[in-house]
């Protein structure tokens, strides 16, 4: 039997889509939404359109509560998907903040009681549905704070795609930790007992698509992500996955970042227009390279459908 070989490589861009922050990762004061009103329509979506990429924008509570932001999102033109992203302190039950300006949000949602976490996710999904008229199906946890309970809740709420897992990384916050050091690097159906462990066999209703990373000895893993990795480094991360998973029919690359990273001063990353331009140019260089190699861009929803219906 000939060894199975990769037939298609899919490239996803999953974007935490939030209010502007400051260079210390604290939410802006006063709260501003340039990332939504300027970032998506004027910077990100035209860039994606220029190379045929299909981003998935994962929307937070404060964005969906802001009328002007919702209006901008409804008017957005092009090919993209909207999903959800949760910072758990900002939604009932057990909501901790009503004014988000100047606030940090260290909570891992998976450290709330499972029923509380479920209700937070349900409220987030209902908020999305009241704004856009349909149910969201793609998700990422704030601070990547997801567990097996999170996946279970998402599945019950009709989600088909989660991208909260960052392989090789253990994240610690004052209220707990999440440990993805043993998690797979390529898409899988998570077992009911551990988000980092694939089902032994068969499928379930929700696909886990890890953020694309490359492990490094004694150093923080390398991201497939503009700004944190150079053009050359992003290619190397992609090539590592293509080589390592050459025996798989499908290989997936999942670029992640935040919408506000393209707004100067709204994250610790680009601080002026020149740097913001460099961010976009590096991203486009990487995506164009992917396209030139015959990789296919996909929304999160379409990729999940492919695995679920395969
Ligand atoms: Zn976030």
Image (cartoon, helix red, strand yellow):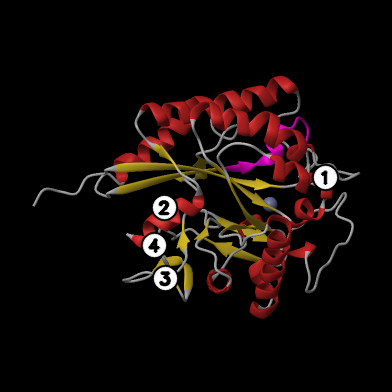
Q: Is residue 130 left or right of residue 198?
A: right
Q: Secondary structure at mark 2?
A: loop
Q: Secondary structure at mark 1?
A: helix
The answer to whether mark 2 is within 8 Å of ligand 1 is no
Q: Secondary structure at mark 3?
A: loop
Q: Is residue 303 left or right of residue 273?
A: left
Q: Residue at x 85, y 43 (%)?
A: 28
Whether label 1 touches label 4, CB < 8 Å: no
Which mark is nearer the camera, 3 or 2?
3
Relative height, residue 108 to residue 17 (above, below): below
Which mark is nearer the camera, 1 or 3?
1
Q: CA distance from mark 4 to mark 2?
A: 18 Å
- Which circle marks residue 68 in the picture? 1
Among numbered discs 1 and 3, the one appearing first in the sequence: 1
Among numbered discs 1 and 4, the one appearing first in the sequence: 1
The answer to whether mark 1 is within 8 Å of ligand 1 is no
- Which circle marks residue 308 in the picture? 4
Dot 2: within a 10 Å radius of its alpha carbon, few (fewer than 14), some, or many (20 or more) residues?
many
Among numbered discs 4 and 2, the one appearing first in the sequence: 2
* Along the line of sight, the residue nearer the viewer: 169 or 218: 169
Q: CA distance from mark 1 to mark 3?
A: 37 Å
Whether label 4 touches label 2, CB < 8 Å: no
Image quarter for residue 83? bottom right
Q: Residue at x 48, y 58 (%)?
A: 181
Q: CA distance from mark 1 to mark 4?
A: 36 Å
Q: CA distance from mark 3 to mark 2?
A: 18 Å
Whether label 2 touches label 1, CB < 8 Å: no
Residue 205 image offset from top left, x and y in percent: 45, 69
């Amino acid at each position: 039997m000939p060894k199975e070989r990769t037939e298609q490589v899919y490239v996803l861009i999953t974007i935490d889509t939030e209010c502007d922050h400051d260079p210390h990762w604290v939410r802006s004061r006063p709260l501003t939404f340039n990332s939504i009103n300027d970032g998506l329509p004027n910077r990100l979506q035209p860039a994606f359109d220029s190379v045929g990429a299909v981003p998935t924008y994962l929307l937070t509570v404060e964005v969906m509560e802001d009328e002007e932001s919702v209006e901008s999102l409804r008017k957005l033109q092009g090919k993209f998907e909207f999903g959800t992203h949760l910072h758990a302190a900002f939604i009932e039950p057990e909501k901790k903040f009503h004014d988000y300006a100047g606030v940090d949000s260290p909570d891992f949602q998976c450290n709330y009681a499972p029923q509380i976490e479920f209700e937070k996710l349900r409220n987030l999904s209902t908020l999305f549905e009241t704004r856009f008229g349909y149910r969201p199906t793609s998700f990422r946890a704030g601070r990547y704070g997801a567990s097996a309970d999170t996946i279970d809740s998402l599945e019950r709420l009709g989600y088909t795609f989660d991208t909260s897992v960052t392989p090789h990384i253990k994240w610690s916050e004052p209220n707990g930790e999440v440990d993805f050091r043993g998690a797979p690097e390529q898409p899988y159906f998570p077992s009911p007992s551990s988000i980092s462990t694939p089902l032994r066999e068969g499928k379930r209703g929700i696909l886990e698509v890890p953020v694309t990373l490359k492990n490094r000895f004694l150093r923080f893993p390398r991201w497939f992500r503009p700004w944190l990795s150079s053009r050359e480094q992003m290619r190397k991360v992609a090539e590592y996955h293509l080589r390592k998973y050459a025996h798989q029919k499908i290989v997936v690359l999942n670029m992640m970042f935040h919408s506000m990273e393209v707004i100067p001063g709204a994250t610790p990353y680009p601080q002026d227009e020149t740097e913001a331009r460099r961010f976009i140019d590096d991203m486009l260089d990487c995506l164009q390279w992917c396209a030139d190699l015959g990789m296919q861009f996909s929304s999160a929803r379409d990729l999940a459908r492919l695995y679920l219906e395969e």
